[in-house]
Image (cartoon, rainbow, N blue to C red):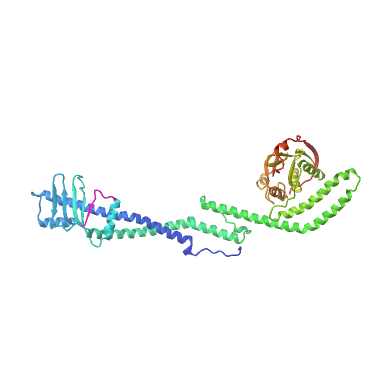
């Protein structure tokens, strides 16, 4: 699927279009929430203004001797207010101003008790009414809370002014919505959508050719979440690119080992035949070294096969058996001695009677690799010990070398990256971890400082032996042996 072309969605189905629509909807909803209370407030202000005018108009009655005015003056005052009649309720008197008999009252509005929701609902009722209604409006006087003013009004003029006001507010709301929506859209497009398109484009381009260094995104200097995503994507792409390079090297290594495996086996077979002839020698020194030589040739064959197996998926095949761990460490010391170039002391601190169930050759390979790495790093003393628990066995391999450099510690079990010496491949510890995990255990770096390095190998404990039985054996016999070593790390 690497060659499949990926195209961005059209604008109608893109994130930008959805963002624009949602922004317009949200802004319009906000404007509606503002528009409805504004219209209700306009109606309330209109009614309060009519009541204030009505209060002033009815005060003209107090200027007459009998609190009465002519019909024409009363009609003129009512026309100025826009009312059918006005009533003023005082604590000790009631005054009324009217010219003709008022029409029947359709609805009553008491501003003294109505709240905002009541005004909103009354606006909706007024606009939904099929014809203008006659309203009876009551409220306290502006300057005297003991006086109540009552006015009979026709909703027609108020309804016309309310619709005109609503039209102006609606037009202004639409303009504000469009301007706000456009600004929010452009801001989000700049802050979010454009960087997201850049991230998407980088991922698509990187997928097409992950090994091309130019396809790795160059992070911006933003300190927000988008900048963090860009930096994390760049690091991930670089990690994937390096992993692909490592895999290519592993594939090349597997191909090379496959090609030389047949010829190497023939060479080792010839060496094995020559070594068998040495077994008939009567010389004591030859008889002593011949078994180790034969075992070394057999391990060389297994090493070739194991290196090839590392390039394949899956754990290496195991041939489990129960054997004495102390004897295995002795063989490792002898192998280091035979290959020696410098003085090295290997201290065997394993209890002689301690047995372990594992693949003997594979475990030999793991411990031998750790010992060889220690010698390569400059260690002169290597110790191998073991502690048995109820469900596991821990093998400790330590040395007095200068410790691992930071680069080696950070990439310890990564092939081609965890070598502690120039020219090393770093395959040794990677293979060692794979072998230990195939046993159901693991290998970890316990300590690494200027005074030395220590590794811990954990193996599951076989169920046929208890901790009490192991601790009842004789105490450990420490073996110190000067050896010559030229062991190189993988």
Image point (59%, 57%), residue name: 216
| The furthest residue to the right | 282
Q: Is residue 107 magenta?
A: yes
Residue 101 percent coordinates (x, y): 13, 57
Asked which quadrant contains residue 252, the reply is bottom right
Residue sitting nearer the eye, 114 or 198: 114
Q: Is residue 165 rendered to the left or right of residue 95? A: right
Image point (14%, 44%), residue name: 92
Q: Is residue 375 above or below residue 474?
A: below
Q: How many marks?
A: 0
The magenta segment = 106-115
Q: Is residue 130 rendered to the left or right of residue 3? A: left
Residue sitting nearer the eye, 10 or 318: 318
Q: Is residue 68 magenta?
A: no
Residue 90 percent coordinates (x, y): 16, 46
Residue 2 percent coordinates (x, y): 61, 63
Residue sitting nearer the eye, 247 or 223: 247
Q: Is residue 393 rendered to the left or right of residue 291? A: left
């Amino acid at each position: 699927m690497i060659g499949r072309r990926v195209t961005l969605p059209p604008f109608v189905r893109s994130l930008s279009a959805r963002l624009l629509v949602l922004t317009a909807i949200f802004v319009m909803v906000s404007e509606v929430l503002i528009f409805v209370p504004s219209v209700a407030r306009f109606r309330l202000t209109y009614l309060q203004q009519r009541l204030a005018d009505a209060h002033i108009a009815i005060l003209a009655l107090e200027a007459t001797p009998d609190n009465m005015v002519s019909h024409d003056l009363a009609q003129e005052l009512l026309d100025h207010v826009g009312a059918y009649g006005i009533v003023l309720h005082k604590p000790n008197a009631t005054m009324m101003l009217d010219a003709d008999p008022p029409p029947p009252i359709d609805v009553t509005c008491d501003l003294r008790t109505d709240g905002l929701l009541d005004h909103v609902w009354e606006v909706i009722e007024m606009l939904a009414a099929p014809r203008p209604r006659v309203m009876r409006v009551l409220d306290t006087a502006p300057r005297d809370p003991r006086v109540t003013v009552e006015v009979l009004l026709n909703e027609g003029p108020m309804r016309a002014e309310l619709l005109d006001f609503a039209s102006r507010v609606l037009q202004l709301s639409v303009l504000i919505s469009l301007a706000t929506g456009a600004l929010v859209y452009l801001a989000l497009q700049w802050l979010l959508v454009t960087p997201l398109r850049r991230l998407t484009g980088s991922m698509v381009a990187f997928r097409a050719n992950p090994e091309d260094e130019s396809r790795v995104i160059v992070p911006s200097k933003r300190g927000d979440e988008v900048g963090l995503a860009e930096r994390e994507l760049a690091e991930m792409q670089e990690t994937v690119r390096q992993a692909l390079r490592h895999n290519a090297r592993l594939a090349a290594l597997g191909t090379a080992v496959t090609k030389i495996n047949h010829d190497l086996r023939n060479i080792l077979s010839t060496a094995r035949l020559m070594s068998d002839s040495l077994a008939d020698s009567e010389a004591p020194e030859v008889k002593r070294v011949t078994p180790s030589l034969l075992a070394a040739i057999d391990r060389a064959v297994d090493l070739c096969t194991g290196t090839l197996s590392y390039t394949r998926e899956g754990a290496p095949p195991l041939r489990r058996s129960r054997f004495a761990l102390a004897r295995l460490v002795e063989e490792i010391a002898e192998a280091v001695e035979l290959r020696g170039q410098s003085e090295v002391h290997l201290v065997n601190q394993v209890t002689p009677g301690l047995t372990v169930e594992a693949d003997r050759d594979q475990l030999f390979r793991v411990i031998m690799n750790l010992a060889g790495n220690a010698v390569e790093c400059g260690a002169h003393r290597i110790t191998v010990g073991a502690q048995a628990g109820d469900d596991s066995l821990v093998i400790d391999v330590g040395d007095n070398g200068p410790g691992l450099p930071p680069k080696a510690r950070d990439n310890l079990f990564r092939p081609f990256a965890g070598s502690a010496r120039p020219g090393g491949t770093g395959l040794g510890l990677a293979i060692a971890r794979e072998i230990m995990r195939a046993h159901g255990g693991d290998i970890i770096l316990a300590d690494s400082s200027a005074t030395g390095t220590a590794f811990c190998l954990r193996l599951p404990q076989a169920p046929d032996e208890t901790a009490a039985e192991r601790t009842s054996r004789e105490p450990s016999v420490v073996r110190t042996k000067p050896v010559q070593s030229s062991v190189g790390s993988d």
